[in-house]
Amino acid sequence: MHSFLRRFPLPMVFILAFCAVSAVYAYGLGPAQQRSVVATTATNLVNLRTDPVGTMVASAFVAQAVPWMWVVLAVIGLFPVVHRFGNVRTLVLVGAAQVIGTLISEGLLAWRISAGAMPASLRYIDDVGPSYVIASALVATMLYGAEPLVRTARHGHRLFDRVPSRWWRIGAGVALAFLAPHLFSGLDRLGVAAVGHLVAMLVGAALGLIFVRRERSRTGQDGPGTAAGVPRRRVLSEV
């Protein structure tokens, strides 16, 4: 796994897998089959009870509408985060956002159903898409950018290393502003998707801050003569 991630950066793996699933979904399946895929992969209360891990992974690769928009947003959000933090920590960040955003939003819904505040039929909602992953990555990019020295140390893609950090931050901010009406629609009513988006973004911001503070701590300990505070041999061995 470590060797695979060194050869194929996480954003490329995610984008290629998402494109493959989206192409099959849009052009290879009929309406009934599409409905079956969504019903099987949706992170609703029923699926989370029977297959929580598989559901949370699969749902991130199924988009019912405008899937190619998510590819563009994945480029803006994921590449800078990987350049800043590396593949493994980026996987931790977006994975935690997907899991925690899902569990809190669906847990709140379960509590409201048990209290009689929401109908039981909402246990079967169609909650699919990569929005938790992308939103958390965009927030991390906007807040923490992709510092040039760190990108060089991580051996990121040469094309993306040429883009200054401030432009990644601006791009992520614009993307979030564009998505905001979609991400937070229904938040005043504690809608599942809106609550999940908010939680995922907070997780992305919090984990990004933890990673940045750890980098700064290593910088203070290691002193000058290192790349971003990490000894050269250690940098070259990290993902």
Image: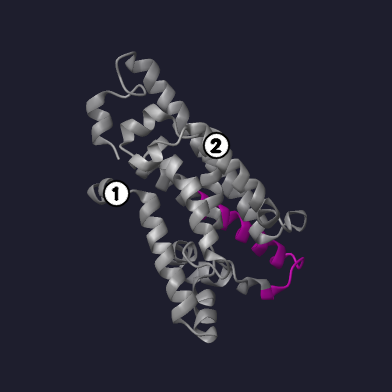
Q: Residue at x 76, y 68 (%)?
A: 116
From the top left corner, tell me how far across and down residue 193 is, in percent: 64, 59
Horizontal side of 230 relative to 48 (left or right) equals left
The residue segment tinted magenta is 97-121
Horizontal side of 101 relative to 194 (left or right) equals left
- Taking the magenta stretch, the answer to whether it contains residue 75 is no
Nearer to me, 139 or 53: 139
From the top left corner, tell me how far across and down residue 94 is, in percent: 47, 49
Kindly give the residue lying farthest to the top in the view shown: 224
From the top left corner, tell me how far across and down residue 215 is, in percent: 41, 26
What residue is pinned by disc 2?
169
| Amino acid type indicated by mark 2 | Arg
Q: Residues within 10 Å of mark 1 (few under 14, many from 20)?
A: some
Relative vertical location of residue 142 with respect to residue 123 in this rendering, above or below:
above
Can the viewer see residue 206 in this picture? no
Relative vertical location of residue 123 with respect to residue 210 in this rendering, above or below:
below
Relative vertical location of residue 213 with respect to residue 11 in this rendering, above or below:
above
In the rendering, which numbered label is found on residue 5? 1
Q: CA distance from mark 2 to mark 1?
A: 24 Å
Q: Main secondary structure of the magenta part?
A: helix
| Amino acid type indicated by mark 1 | Leu
Q: Residue at x 57, y 66 (%)?
A: 66
From the top left corner, tell me how far across and down residue 36 is, in percent: 51, 81
Q: Residue at x 50, y 38 (%)?
A: 207
Relative vertical location of residue 88 with respect to residue 225 in this rendering, above or below:
below
- Image colouring: one colour
